[in-house]
């Protein structure tokens, strides 16, 4: 494995996303750290066949905080490792 391969791996995350009821989970490998939550939501909703007309938000399972749409997923992962666990929830429209 070269230094370039390591750099590429460091730029990617494995993202596990659960539905609001914890009955379905999709694992999205090789998600760029620069990806925004809306990109993950689109992939997860499609994979789980959830209603596309619902506004979905993502919650970080570790901190229980809702993800800001503008923050890259790499900020959620921080230095903790290449895996992020998230849960979809309907967006109640209460954000600021």
Image (cartoon, grey):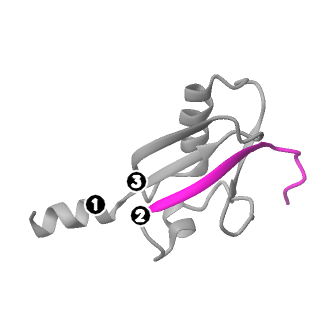
Residue beneath the point at 21% across and 66% down: 6
Image quadrant for the N terminus?
bottom left
Q: How crowded is mark 2: few (under 14 residues within 10 Å), some or many (20 or more)?
A: some
**Mark sitting on residue 82:** 2
Disc assigned to residue 32? 3
Identify which residue, 20 or 74, lies in the foreground: 20
Residue at (58, 36) in percent of width and height: 44
Image coordinates for residue 78, horizontal then vertical, percent: 50, 74
Q: Is residue 71 above or below residue 91?
A: below
User: Horizontal and vertical percent for residue 70?
Assistant: 62, 58
Q: Earlier in the sequence, mark 3 or mark 1?
A: 1
Looking at this view, is 12 or 36 the one in front? 12
* Mark 1, residue position: 9
Q: Give the quarter of the figure containing the C terminus.
A: bottom right
Write the residue at 53% across / 34% down: 43
Left or right: 10 in relation to 55? left
- The picture places residue 82, in percent across and down from the top left corner, at 41, 63
Residues rendered magenta in the picture: 83-96
Mark 1 to mark 2: distance in Å? 9 Å
Answer yes or no: do the residues labelled 1 and 2 have beta carbons within 8 Å? yes
Residue name at image x 88 percent, y 46 percent: 93
Q: State how far apart marks 3 and 2 are (Cα).
A: 10 Å
Q: Which of 9 and 95 is in front in this view?
A: 9
């Amino acid at each position: 494995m070269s230094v370039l391969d390591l750099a590429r791996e460091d730029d990617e995350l494995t993202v596990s996303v659960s539905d609001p009821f914890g009955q379905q989970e999709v694992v999205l490998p090789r998600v760029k750290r620069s990806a925004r939550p809306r990109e993950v939501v689109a992939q997860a909703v499609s994979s789980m066949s959830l209603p596309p007309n619902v506004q979905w938000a993502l919650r970080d399972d570790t901190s229980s905080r809702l993800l800001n749409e503008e923050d890259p997923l790499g900020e959620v992962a921080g230095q903790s490792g290449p895996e992020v666990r998230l849960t979809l929830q309907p967006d109640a429209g209460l954000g600021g």
